[in-house]
Amino acid sequence: MTRNEIKAINAHFRQIDDSHLWPICGRFNATERAIKRVQKLCKDGLTIDDPAEYSIVLENEISQIVNNSY
């Protein structure tokens, strides 16, 4: 997977994001936090070869953040 593909997917998630309307605990945007967490996971050794897989990992991370923040 290329850096440009990752940037495009991140941009897409930011474009459709509406979590800025409901910041988690009034403090942060779930999409931005999820992107940063997935980037860290990749730096720590998580291998994602396919853009669809990256999207799924990112979506799961967003869900986990939203569901576990309260």
Image (spheres, helix red, strand yellow):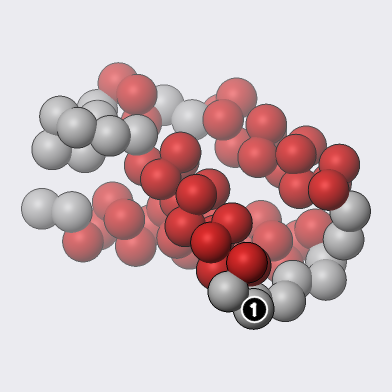
Q: Residue 53 placed where, x, y %?
A: 72, 67
In the picture provided, is 5 more to the left or to the right than 19?
right
Residue 25 seen in the figure: yes
In the picture provided, is 54 more to the left or to the right than 38?
right
In the picture provided, is 28 more to the left or to the right than 38?
left
Q: Residue 66 placed where, x, y %?
A: 28, 51
Q: Residue at x 87, y 61 (%)?
A: 1
Q: Residue at x 46, y 38 (%)?
A: 32
Q: Judging from the image, what secondary structure is the residue with disc 1 in?
A: loop
Question: Splitting the image into 4 quarters, where does residue 46 fall?
Answer: bottom right
Question: Splitting the image into 4 quarters, where does residue 24 fall?
Answer: top left
Is residue 53 placed above or below 15 in the rendered structure? below
In the image as oriented, which residue stretches furthest toward the front? 43
Residue 59 seen in the figure: no
In the picture provided, is 26 more to the left or to the right than 62?
left
- The three-letter amino acid code for the residue at tag 1 is Gly
Is residue 53 placed above or below 65 in the rendered structure? below
Question: Splitting the image into 4 quarters, where does residue 14 fall?
Answer: top right
In the image as oriented, which residue stretches furthest toward the top? 21
The crowding category of the residue bearing disc 1, from other C-alpha atoms within 10 Å (few below 14, some 14 to 19, many at least 20), is few
Q: Residue at x 76, y 48 (%)?
A: 6
Q: Residue 25 placed where, x, y %?
A: 13, 38
Label count reads 1
Q: Residue at x 74, y 71 (%)?
A: 48
Residue to which mark 1 is pinned? 45
Q: Residue 29 placed where, x, y %?
A: 35, 34
